[in-house]
């Protein structure tokens, strides 16, 4: 039992990593990873919503008629996202300013609805919470990794600590760099995961 | 396992979920309303403090057309103005807080928000040389870029952002000048 709990968490990190294997949630992945810190914050925000919405959905799924389950799930997810947004605005305005637009967009992040459909709707609340944690950690890890690489190459710094003077390779801070880093990491990741 | 797909169940289910979520949102909104307002005010105050000489008593915001300004008074005489000014940047509005002395000298400027390109126009709030030239910019100086015949060094490869920045500062100074003539 303990073993299967652990495997629910670790599959989000490696075998079913949402970013590199399932290819879900590409919009925030590409857009918010301009620096390591932004990637980390976005990952944590998504993880928060993912865990709570997984728990809530696993609890209500048995009584929701099939034909309306998508709207019900979306309302639940949107509620948690809005709660998160309000709390961030109130207590961490600096973080809210950097992530800004991408917080409301968590609602339409495919990972969250995808996990609600594929996992939380069919499992109990405890397993769903673990699944949310695992997927959330996997997403956070991927975003932070992309963020670290883009920040090193594009800005010459790690988590805001600058180790070169002047500019880095500008393209890596912008969209093309995001695609490049994502692509190469995907190759690397799938090579390791397939072994 | 799931409830039957009849009309009554579907309506009831959606109704209850929406009711419940609405209640949660309403209460969270009520709890966070005050802290959010306080955070916004604190942010504006911090920005004003950065662009004005210290020690003034800062007024409530005053609207003037599209712009908004604050008056700083020391012993009832006006010591400076902080003007919230904006211009169209490269990829969205560039919003600045500009501190202007009554004689038209720019005391200091600060970027409140921008959506410029990272690594290019986004340097408007980090490029040391660009920021430093606004500090105590003389009242008779020409606030346009050097390549447009003025006194301002543009950020490399970010002419549009630099022009927007200059325009916003210029508008702020014009506002203060017009206030002086009243």
Image: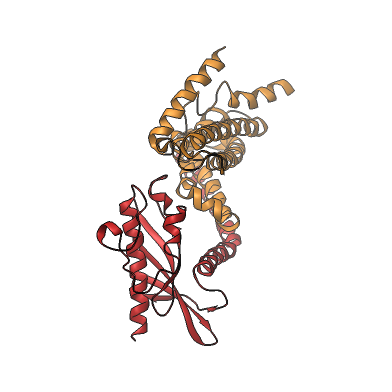
Chain colours: A orange, B red
Camera-side residue: A155 or A41?
A: A155
In this picture, residue B151 sits left or right of residue B130: left
Q: Indicate the quadrant containing the N terminus of chain B: top left, top right, bottom left or bottom right.
A: top right
User: What residue is drawn where x is 58% and y is 41%?
Assistant: A159
- Residue A165, percent from left and from top: 50, 42
In this picture, residue B130 sits left or right of residue B142: right
Q: Is residue A1 visible?
A: no
Q: Is residue B18 visible?
A: yes
User: What residue is drawn where x is 54% and y is 69%?
Assistant: B49
In this picture, residue A71 sits left or right of residue A14: left
Q: Indicate the quadrant containing the C terminus of chain B: top left, top right, bottom left or bottom right.
A: bottom left
- Residue B94, percent from left and from top: 38, 58
Q: Is residue B33 above or below residue B121?
A: below
Camera-side residue: B178 or B3?
A: B178
User: What residue is drawn where x is 26% and y is 62%?
Assistant: B149
Q: Residue furthest right?
A: A2
Q: Is residue B179 above or below residue B118?
A: below
């Amino acid at each position: 039992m303990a073993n299967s709990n652990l495997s629910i968490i670790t599959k989000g990190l490696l075998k079913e990593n949402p970013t590199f294997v399932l290819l879900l949630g590409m919009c925030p992945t590409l857009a918010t990873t301009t620096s390591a810190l932004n990637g980390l914050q976005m990952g944590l925000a998504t993880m928060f919503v993912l865990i709570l919405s997984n728990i809530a959905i696993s609890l209500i799924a048995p009584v929701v008629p099939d034909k309306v389950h998508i709207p019900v799930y979306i309302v639940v997810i949107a509620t948690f996202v809005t709660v998160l947004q309000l709390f961030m605005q109130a207590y961490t305005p600096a973080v809210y300013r950097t992530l800004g637009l991408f917080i409301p967009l968590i609602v339409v992040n495919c990972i969250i609805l995808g996990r609600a459909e594929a996992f939380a709707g069919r499992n109990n609340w405890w397993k769903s919470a673990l699944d949310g944690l695992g997927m959330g950690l996997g997403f956070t890890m991927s975003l932070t990794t992309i963020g670290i690489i883009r920040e090193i190459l594009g800005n010459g710094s790690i988590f805001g600590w600058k180790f070169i003077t002047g500019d880095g390779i500008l393209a890596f801070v912008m969209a093309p760099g995001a695609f490049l880093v994502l692509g190469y990491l995907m190759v690397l990741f799938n090579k390791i995961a397939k072994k | 396992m799931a409830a039957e797909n009849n009309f009554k169940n579907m309506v009831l289910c959606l109704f209850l979920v929406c009711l419940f979520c609405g209640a949660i949102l309403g209460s969270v909104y009520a709890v966070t309303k005050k802290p959010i307002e306080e955070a916004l005010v604190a942010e504006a105050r911090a920005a004003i403090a950065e662009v004005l000489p210290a020690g003034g008593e800062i007024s409530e915001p005053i609207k003037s057309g599209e712009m908004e300004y604050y008056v700083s008074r020391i012993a009832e005489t006006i010591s400076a103005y902080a003007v919230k000014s904006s211009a169209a940047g490269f990829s969205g509005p560039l919003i600045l807080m500009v501190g202007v002395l009554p004689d038209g000298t720019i005391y200091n400027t600060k970027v409140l928000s921008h959506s410029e390109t990272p690594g290019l126009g986004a340097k408007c709030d980090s490029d040391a040389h660009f920021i430093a030239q606004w500090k105590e910019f003389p009242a008779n100086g020409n606030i346009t870029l050097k390549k447009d015949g003025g006194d301002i060094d543009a950020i490399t490869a970010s002419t549009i952002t630099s022009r927007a920045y200059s325009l916003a500062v210029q508008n702020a100074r014009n506002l203060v000048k017009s206030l002086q003539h009243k």
